[in-house]
Image (spheres, helix red, strand yellow):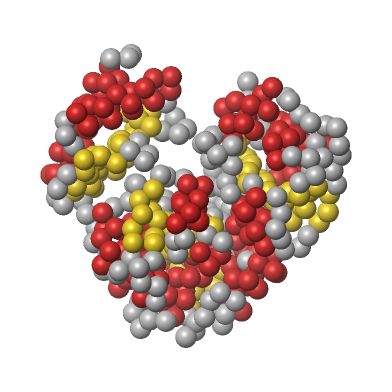
Amino acid sequence: MDEHIFRAYDIRGIFGKDLTTEIAENIGKAFGTYIGSGKEIIVGRDARLSGEVLKAALIKGLISVGCNVIDVGIVTTPVVYFSIEYLKKDGGVMITASHNPPEWNGFKLCGKNGISISESLGLEKVKEIFIEQKFDTTKKGSISHREIVDEYIKFVVGKVKLKKKLKVVLDTGNGVCALTAPSILERLGCDVVTINKELDGRFPNRSPDPTEAALEALRSVVLEEKADVGIAFDGDGDRVAFVDEKGRYISSGNVTIPIFASSILKANKNSKIVFDVCCSNAVEEIIKAHNGIPLVNRVGRAYIRNRMLEEGAIFGGEHSNHLFFSDIFSFDDGVFAGVKMVELLSNSDKPISSFVDAIPIYPSISVKEIVCPDNFKFNIMKNLKKRFSGLGHKIIDLDGIKIINSDGWVLIRPSNTLPAIKINSEAKTMDKAKELFSFAENIVREEIAEYV
């Protein structure tokens, strides 16, 4: 009855309805059984009001199956990732619902080296243990506490060099990035203005999702303060959004990946950069133009990071603006990405707006979700692959089906969380983007009609 809380990348639900202390304890038992008795597990949480009781229940479950827990307290998700690598532990759990509303909470699970335990990477096994309650309770573990935030701050400061002082406005969104981002930028010598800095798990001032509508206050302060850049974070700190000095919102990997890639590749020619299949053609074009090696990949932080580690890539990013730097164990870290943007601007005589305006924006049709029953959608995707291949189209099938021609592309993907198939397109002209989209949508609807 609790199966729906297991998502593609994590475990998530509404506290008191989907997630109770009993469920949290059993998640601890299931994960601990999966990891193994005697293993050392980092546990942290964000600022949500339900975080402490869920953490206590989770830890109780972990200890009951023999795991030794290191509680790092209230931190960002990337600090949990960092702790696993930095302290050389066996795994970790971050208690967070990321950008979801305050009544939600959840668990992000990691194995050794901070590898995400997600769909096809072990989460299905944890789910099986959880459902069948096959817990190994033959041994008891222990709990200890570790202050890690200052060590993380020192690590990040040591990875960044600024040539000149910048004025930066931070919107930490009443979330956990308030514990790290202002201190890091102040230690680097920046003039920092922080709004929404009080930790409040109700997120009273804006949504934990840093959408354009949620960042009006940040935009206003950037303009009032004549700041060089505004930086905002999601609820757990693994994603970042920017506001340029003109007050314009920047949150797409289609813009930030090329900006970072062009900068990084100046000193690292012929380096590999990983990006997901949803990204614009502009991403690959700019990587190639700066003597980089572009590697297209499946969507999802676990898959991007794994590919980076396998290939020795220097940088990676997702369309959703998760940004991964080899400087920090190839994790997606919103605070680190924000600080690296400040470094990039500090080492240039150009404002951030000039970097943004240099990125080509191709006409595109945004994602549309077509209702498709979960029990049919993956068979339908197989049929779609055969059908498009049979028509002689060039396709990439790393994640769904991306159909490519000389005009542009259309991407068809099964939703990981909804009974739906998603379609979006991009082309050199809007007419071509619409044409590609309609072509794909008609075929998808025909295939769905065969099943329902």
| Residue 74 seen from this side | no
Residue 324: percent from the left, percent from the top?
48, 59
| Side of 220 relative to 436 (left or right) | right
Q: Quadrant of residue 409?
A: top left
Quick one: 28 or 314, which is closer to the camera? 314
In x, y percent, where is residue 259? 35, 67
Identify the residue at horizontal 59%, vertical 75% (top origin): 157
The percent position of residue 123, horizontal first and vertical second, equals 59, 35
Residue 408 left/right relative to 401:
left
Q: Is residue 184 left or right of residue 350?
A: right
Q: Residue at x 36, y 54 (%)?
A: 295
Count of numbered marks: 0
Q: Position of residue 290 (x, y in %)?
A: 29, 69
Quarter of the rendering occupied by the N terminus = top right
Viewport quadrant of the C terminus: top left
Up-down: is 185 above or below 446?
A: below
User: What residue lies at 46% left-to-right and 52% top-to-bottom?
Assistant: 307
Residue located farthest toward the bottom when viewing the structure as drawn: 164
Give the answer, above or below, for where 176 lies relative to 435.
Answer: below
Q: Quadrant of residue 97?
A: top right
| Residue 441 shows in this picture | yes
Residue at image coords 42%, 81%: 347
